[in-house]
Amino acid sequence: MSQNTEISSAQSEFITHLRSRKRASATIVAYGKDIDQLVSFLKDMGKKTMAEISKDDLLAFLGKLGKDGYTPKSISRKINSIKTFYRFLKAQSYVVEDPTVNISHPKYEVKPPRILSRVEYRALRDACRDDARISAIVELFLQTGLRIGELANLKLTDVRDNELQIAAQESHAQRVVPLNKAAKQAVDRYLETRSKTENPTLFVTKTGRPLLIRNIRTAIDRYFKLAGIEKAKVNDLRHTFIAHHLASGTPLTVISKLVGHKRLSTTEKYLEFIKGKAEENVKLEEL
């Protein structure tokens, strides 16, 4: 391993390393974009090998990000990517010293998760009631706390009488979640109108092709707008499932298992967001 290794070669090896560690595809894409942006900046500066890069160069890159309008949160994420990159480089002896050690993260406010109120998720249900497919998708999000990637990967055979089989996906283990009456009725109603296709994917387009994640996001965003719900995203339906069930008294351990959290502490964080909301203490399926 040489410190005179070209930057682009080190970059390629880093991505290969992430894949070998079976990191989530979204994580690999994010790291890849961040490091690619850094590499482009360094090449514009005339830097060709890892040995030529100094801490000042990295600080100059971060400074440019700030001038280009990147938020402190975005810059902090890019710092994480760069630090991970350099830990790999040092482990491979591409660098002797890690110039990112003393680079600190900018301070920024961590916003609490967006939790829909009863009025809001009822309005969302009403807005998409005439669209059986999106109605079923919304109900599954609200009643099971699925991740969007998990929902997009559901197969027809994953839907059973009173439960939903969620296949293992990247770093997330396989699990089974119960299907309550509201979710089961919504899915059954969708299946009556589902396009005739041999494709095993549960949610498909009118032409029988799998409904992609970006299609799901676009559709839900459209219905958020129709329902008059502001500043909400698809993942907020998952947040809503967790928060409302915790507020209704469902044990932390049960919720953590249902939503596939690796650590109980991840679920515990929601407790601070449901304080003082006794009026919302009603399970979603009871509405």
Image (cartoon, rainbow, N blue to C red):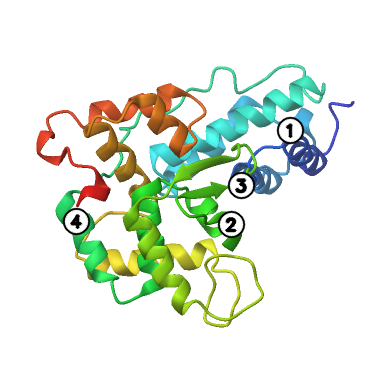
How far is the residue under mark 3 from the one under mark 1? 20 Å
Given residues 175 and 244, the one toward you in this image is 175
* Amino acid identity at mark 4: Glu
Given residues 238 and 77, the one toward you in this image is 238
How far is the residue under mark 4 from the one under mark 3? 30 Å
Q: Position of residue 105 (x, y in %)?
A: 45, 26
How far is the residue under mark 2 from the one under mark 4? 27 Å
Dividing the picture into quadrants, the one containing residue 53 is top right
| Residue occupying image coordinates x 67% and y 37% | 23
Q: Are marks 2 and 3 in contact (CB under 8 Å)?
A: yes
Helix, strand or loop for disc 1 = loop
Whether residue 57 can be seen here: no
Disc 2 crowd rating (10 Å Cα; few below 14, some 14-19, many 20+) is: many
Q: Are marks 1 and 4 in contact (CB under 8 Å)?
A: no
* Amino acid identity at mark 1: Arg
Residue behind mark 1: 21
> Disc 1 vs disc 2: which is toward the camera?
2
* Amino acid identity at mark 2: Asn
Q: Can you tell which mark lies on residue 153?
A: 2
